Image (spheres, rainbow, N blue to C red):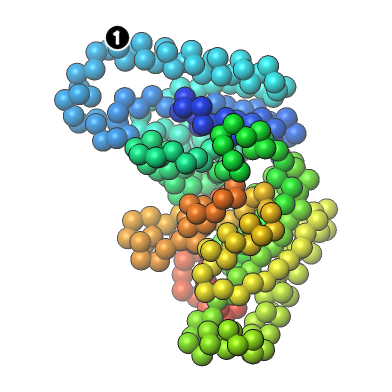
Amino acid sequence: MYKMIMVPTDGSGFDREAIRVALRVAERSQAAVRLVRVHSTGAFFGMESSPEAATVPVAMFQEERDRILNELYSLAAECRSTSDAKIGVALEDGPVPDALEAYASANNVDLIVISSHGRGGISRLSLGSVTDSLIRHTTTPVLVVKPRASYLNPEAGEPFRRIVVPLDGSSLAEQILPEVAALAKVDEAKLTLLQVLVPRTSPQKAMAGGGISWWDKNIAAAQAYLFRTAGKLRQDGFLTTTDVVVSENIAQAIADYAGTARADLIAIATHGRGGISRALRGSVADVVTRTARTSMLVFRPAGALADEAPEKEARLPDGMPVIA
């Protein structure tokens, strides 16, 4: 069960989806909720070395912090009027991603809940980058809440009843299981373990389209693996089903499957790659998080980058690369 849930807030009002979800999870798990806002003074936008940043009066800086604190206190009071969860606030200073990551680490945060929305321009860039940075740099699970309609949609706070968990046979992918089990227990959710098989050669791709049964062996191996994994979850009391799909695009297949199954959440582990490695190898988790309309639970295990050794991929069923 969770003990400390962090909700990053930016004062825009678009954080309400995340707050509703965090309060619900906190009530059911008797966890505390911490609303955290960062006073960046332009540092996140690269202004720390600019004349504008250097000439901000101390009094103005403090006045701005006081205003933000008052907003946080008002938001916490509003939350307490509708929830029995223990709610606190924190105002941090510094670049937004760094400050949030440091707070989560220092305060033993079990779950970070953050909203995703369709804002444009620099606001979308900054908030999207914050979520991306949290996913890649923290070992705390990040729950990215995506409302089905507008940010006023109350459905965002509803339980996650159907959760799709993409697996590929690797130890990395399986490390999402304890994290999703914790959330599934809170929401009494049904889990679907999904494996996407990808034709890797031209003959395989051609035969896959013709309905030839060469793929049966690979599907059988994937089904056996998922059945064994699901059995462990069933022993712990989780209602769990399995499914295998064939597609040349893993990320799109996961997103499409979740949409067709009317899933409330996709739960996936990631390497948390960055820089050149990320650009060259890509990331299934990253693409799904950015493109799927379904809310996401994303987890980067400690030491995930060390698990990228080639021999790790060699033992996977043919046609299924590691979910990164």
Q: Against 143, is 84 above or below?
A: above
Q: Is residue 107 visible?
A: no
Could you tell whether 54 is left or right of 35 in the image? left
The residue beneath circle 1 is: 59
Q: Quadrant location of residue 233?
A: bottom right
Residue at 53%, 84% (x, y): give it.
205
Q: Identity of the amino acid at label 1?
A: Ala
Q: Against 200, is 251 above or below?
A: above
Classed neighbour count for the residue bearing mark 1: other residues with Cα under 10 Å, few (<14), some (14–19), many (≥20) = few
Q: Position of residue 324 (x, y in %)?
A: 49, 62
Residue at 69%, 62% (x, y): give it.
193
Q: Position of residue 309 (x, y in %)?
A: 46, 70
Could you tell whether 194 is left or right of 189 in the image? left
Front residue of 165/94: it is: 165
Quadrant location, the N terminus: top right
Question: Disc 1 on helix, strand or loop?
Answer: helix
Q: Position of residue 194 (x, y in %)?
A: 66, 65
Residue at 44%, 46% (x, y): give it.
132
